[in-house]
Amino acid sequence: MSTNSITVFRGETSHLKRMVSVPDRISPEGYQRELEHIFKKAWLPTASASDITDKGSHIVVDVPPLKTSVIIVRGQDDVVRAFQNVCRHRGDKLVQRAGCGKQFTCGFHGWRYSTEGALIGVTDETQFPDLDRSKLGLIPVHCEVWNDLIFLNFAKTPHEPLSAWLGGIYDQYSGYAEGREKTGEHRVVLKANWNMAVNAFCEGYHNMYIHKYTVPDYQGGKNNPMRHRAYIEVGKRFGRYSAHANMDHKRTPAEAVLYGRSKPLFPSFPRTDPDTLTPGINPSRFGEWAFDIVHLFPHFVFNPTANSHLYMWFWPIDAEHVELRVLSFAFKARNAADRLAQAYSRVRIREVLREDLATMEAASRMIATGALPFMVFSQQELLIQNHYAIADEMMGRNVEPIERPMAVA
Ligand code: FES
Ligand SMILES: [Fe+2]
């Protein structure tokens, strides 16, 4: 561990690179390597367990990089399972939308499956001599629930269980979603590479510039004018940081009215007793804490604050398109004032997210030209360095250091 004036760093950083070559990573060939070595092997955060709380409830989730559809269902035994969304007869898409029930019925010829995946009904079954139903259950996808997040793994046999994949943080987040409700959902497809997209949410270096009109004074404060992160940690398959709240943040008139009658939400951060937080949130117990960013490699960012949290997925569609899915959660509304506070914060978040998104398409387009041989990262962008180091390790890349970073052609 080392420190500078503000940031406490944790984790092994000696292998990280401050300059990373990018053009080949975002090429179609590079993307194929990412599919094979990352998206077909990683534990992928995919959905919120809050969407399937009742026995028999299910959701249908598209997984763009693998071009597949998955049913995630809470069985009658309360176990959450995932299945390829395909009928074992002739391959029709079995389930079209979220719902709740005791069975799935295929719309093509009426084969029926239990919520635990067993084939329980075959239309006109006598016409299928020797059909063995027990061998024709739904095709499972490896699935594990971690707190409120459902992870999938598309490997035949995952290299390691989710607990090992997440390492030391596996036990640090219990209960973070309790007492919360979903307050918003956004989806947008961008003409950008998924790496560029997730990178933009893994550092706070940009917030003084991109967000200078929408949230001019929400971070840092007089003792931290460059808004260094309070805490930065890199791990085997994750990176996380804590942001410093500006305790002198001037509330807008709307914030003053709405958060004065409810609980403060983005971009107003209340002073919070760190000991009320689960250990993984604000892990350094920083007193003027605003929020955390937790990057779960490869494509997911978790953003908890004292009274809310966001999930952000950056699903690659191909080398140059990414689908951003955002779910927002906040404390459960008790009255109209709470509901108004939630609605107001949702609009402010959307405004800020749109500013983040604005950078991605242009950067992806220029990098794809090959004009930029490498990117340069500061210490405040350590999570991005970690992102590429994990990617290189999973893809077996042996990356040569860039020797003459300042050379001009
Ligand atoms: S494809 Fe589903 S019953 Fe025929
Ligand atoms: Fe941002």
Image (cartoon, helix red, strand yellow):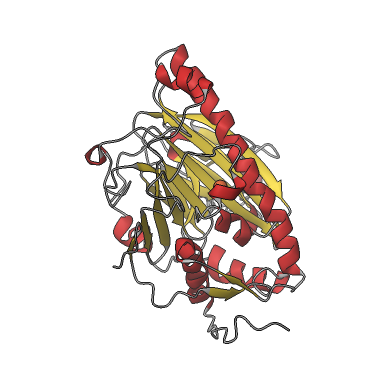
Q: Which residue is depicted at the point 60% across and 61% down? A: 195
Can see residue 333? no
**Among all residues in the image, which is located at the extreme right?**
369
Residue 237: where, in percent of width, then height? 42, 64
Q: Residue furthest top?
A: 336
Residue sitting farthest toward the front: 222
Number of marks in the image? 0
Residue ID at (32%, 62%):
167
The residue positioned 60% from the left and 42% from the top of the image is 353
Horizontal relation, residue 67 to residue 267: left or right: right
Relative side of 382 to 322, left or right: left
Residue 186 x/y as whole percent = 61, 37
Side of 342 relative to 126 (left or right): left
Q: Residue 161 versus residue 252: which sits nearer the camera? A: 252
Quadrant of the drawing holding the N terminus: bottom left
- Viewer-nearest residue: 313 or 147: 313
| Quadrant of image for the C terminus | bottom right
- On the image, the x and y values in percent for residue 261 come to 41, 16
Q: Is residue 386 visible?
A: yes
Q: Report x, y in % for residue 188.
A: 67, 43
**Which residue lies at the image location 42% right of the left edge and 32% below the top edge?**
53
Q: Nearer the viewer, residue 177 or 102?
A: 177
On screen, 364 above or below 150? below
